[in-house]
Image (cartoon, rainbow, N blue to C red):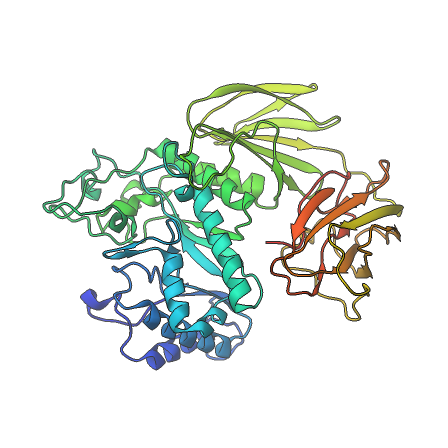
């Protein structure tokens, strides 16, 4: 839910409120109405737990005020929302992000906008729980060949994460998650007269960034030349953007949009970002709708494992993005592995080895399933993503004893000790309740001088959290050794390096051992991002 000032005059719809306290009162009343506590609640409404303060405040169309003024609004809105419901999540207002620094005329990158806000109001850093961005790329692919890699979707997320980590070091607090609360592609083309594609501007606009706002005026005679993508491209880009975001640790992504909120009445370019047609077309599903359905079936409960053997894309911020094959590996609880593959241009015939004993199938973007057998499978990878799904039989997890080795490249001072009070398992630990409930957790210190520590794993469905004290800006090399016949494994790569650049000399949960990890194959960090 996005919160705006209550304005009645159309031309001031996006203007900042005259009195910030009025806005705070409005936020408090809205959150209270939908907090589900039985007091002044909206009849029959579900509880709303996530609120975003404004929308795209770095765009002149939607926030004609300054970054400092937005900082005042954000602080007031955050405090009011938490007063009404302390458990709600408050997101900063959906900033358009390009390269993290650009500023010219009426355009300012969202991250630079936040820097200007923080310069005026450093305490605004603590006035949001999630960093919401809008990395729109309306007329190119998320992994477009020929653009600067830094402004690809991959680059924008990396830039956002680097900014977030740097500012967390500077201002303190926990590292907050990145959310993409809007991204999408319009299918408005030249033969779609009512959505104004391809109109020539009477006065050419000096730069294109202004067009990347969701609220650009595209009325006849005023619009710049601007075309959307085909239905097929929209479907392809939807899947590719989700897979990229999930691989890079984005916690939430909302595609803009399921259906046009104005039902075709607005007659603008952005109405056709919807994946359902309007009421005049009986809400007929577009190709992107089916692509989204299949995507949700395959990846909703999956977590990112790493890159497959065919992956040949390497992010280089200052390089021009070239042709590449993307091969991302995900895992779903219950011994299911899902590979997502595509090329950003053209196609290629490939062969992949299959896992021994797995039931495997190839699934197209639109959901067509082809069972595959044998030790390998050959298929064509194109701009249309394809899934390779492999499922191994689930075997009981025995109680066993394993050996873990922890080695630090630099040994911190002090003696590691176990924490006295168990720390809650992080919200992004990959142990869904319907598969492997964590009944209790067991904590123990890990030596950092190269000694081998013998550990006895607890009963199935428990998780062991290992700790060691760290020093800022020190790299630690963590190694684990688990017997090859053991069905218990690390929820992390078996060999990995972590730099404790923002851990503030504290003890942290690093490598949980989980009964969910069957067999002991590389998985993911359970605590980071």
Query: x and y percent of residue 251 in the render?
Result: 54, 53
Whether residue 348 appears in this view of the structure is yes
Judge whether residue 488 can be spotted in this image.
no
Name the spot of residue 426 as percent of width and height, x first.
66, 60
For the N terminus, give its image quadrant.
bottom left
The C terminus - image quarter:
bottom right
Is residue 363 placed above or below 421 in the rendered structure? Answer: above
Residue at image point 63% right, 57% down: 473
Residue 369 or residue 10, whichever sits in front: 10
How many circles with numbers are drawn on the protein? 0
Name the spot of residue 432 as percent of width and height, x first.
Answer: 67, 51
Q: Seen in the image, is 426 located left or right of residue 163?
A: right
Residue drawn at (61%, 31%), measured in percent from left and top?
308
- Residue at 64% over, 65% down: 504
Q: Which residue is drawn at 24% across and 57% down?
A: 106
Q: Please say if 21 is above or below 191.
A: below
Q: Is residue 179 left or right of residue 225?
A: right
On screen, residue 433 versus residue 102, left or right, reads: right
284 or 517: which is nearer to us? 517
Q: Give the percent coordinates (x, y) of residue 253.
A: 47, 50
State the residue in front, 113 or 318.
318
Task: Give the quadrant of residue 225.
Answer: top left
Q: In which quarter of the view is residue 433 placed?
A: bottom right
């Amino acid at each position: 839910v996005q919160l705006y000032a209550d304005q009645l005059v159309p031309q001031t719809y996006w203007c900042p409120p005259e009195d910030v306290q009025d806005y705070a009162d409005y936020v408090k009343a809205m959150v209270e109405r939908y907090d589900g506590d039985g007091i002044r609640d909206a009849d029959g409404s579900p509880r709303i737990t996530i609120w975003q303060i404004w929308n795209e405040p770095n765009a002149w169309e939607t926030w004609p005020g300054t970054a400092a003024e937005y900082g005042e609004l954000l602080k007031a809105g955050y405090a009011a929302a938490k007063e009404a419901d302390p458990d709600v999540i408050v997101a900063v207002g959906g900033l358009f992000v390009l390269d993290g620094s650009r500023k010219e005329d009426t355009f300012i990158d969202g991250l630079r906008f936040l820097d200007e806000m923080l310069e005026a109001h450093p305490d605004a850093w603590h006035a949001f729980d999630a960093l919401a961005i809008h990395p729109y790329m309306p007329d190119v692919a998320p992994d477009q060949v020929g653009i600067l890699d830094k402004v690809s979707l991959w680059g924008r997320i990396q830039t956002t994460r680097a900014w977030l980590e740097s500012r967390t070091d500077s201002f303190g607090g926990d590292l907050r998650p990145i959310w993409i609360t809007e991204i999408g592609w319009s299918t408005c083309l030249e033969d779609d007269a009512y959505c104004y594609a391809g109109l020539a501007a009477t006065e050419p606009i000096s730069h294109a960034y202004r067009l990347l706002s969701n609220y650009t005026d595209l009325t006849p005679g005023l619009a710049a030349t601007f075309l959307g993508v085909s239905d097929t491209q929209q479907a392809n880009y939807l899947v590719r953007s989700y897979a990229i975001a999930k691989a890079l640790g984005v916690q939430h992504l909302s595609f803009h949009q399921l259906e046009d909120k104005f039902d075709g009445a607005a007659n603008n370019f952005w109405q056709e970002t919807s994946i359902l047609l309007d009421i005049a077309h009986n809400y007929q599903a577009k190709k992107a709708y089916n692509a989204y359905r299949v995507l949700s079936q395959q990846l909703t409960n999956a977590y990112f494992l790493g890159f497959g053997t065919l992956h040949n894309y390497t992010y280089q911020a200052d390089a021009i993005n070239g042709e590449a094959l993307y091969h991302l590996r995900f895992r779903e609880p219950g011994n299911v592995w899902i590979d997502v593959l595509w090329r950003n241009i053209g196609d290629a015939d490939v062969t992949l080895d299959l896992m021994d004993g797995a039931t495997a199938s190839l699934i197209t973007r639109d959901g067509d399933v082809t069972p595959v057998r044998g030790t390998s499978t050959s298929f064509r990878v194109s701009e249309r993503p394809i899934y390779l799904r492999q499922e191994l039989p689930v075997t009981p997890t025995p109680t066993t004893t394993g050996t873990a080795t922890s080695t630090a490249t630099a040994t911190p001072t002090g003696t590691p000790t176990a924490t006295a009070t168990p720390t809650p398992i992080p919200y992004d630990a990959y142990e869904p309740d319907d598969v492997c409930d964590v009944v209790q957790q067991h904590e123990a210190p890990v030596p950092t001088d190269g000694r081998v520590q013998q550990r006895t794993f607890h009963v199935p469905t428990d998780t062991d959290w290992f700790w060691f004290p760290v020093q800022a800006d020190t790299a630690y090399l963590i190694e684990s050794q688990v017997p090859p016949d053991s069905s218990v494994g690390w929820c992390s790569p078996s060999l990995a390096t972590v730099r404790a650049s923002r851990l503030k000399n504290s003890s942290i949960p690093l490598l949980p051992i989980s009964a969910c990890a069957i067999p002991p194959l590389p998985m993911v960090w359970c605590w980071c991002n």
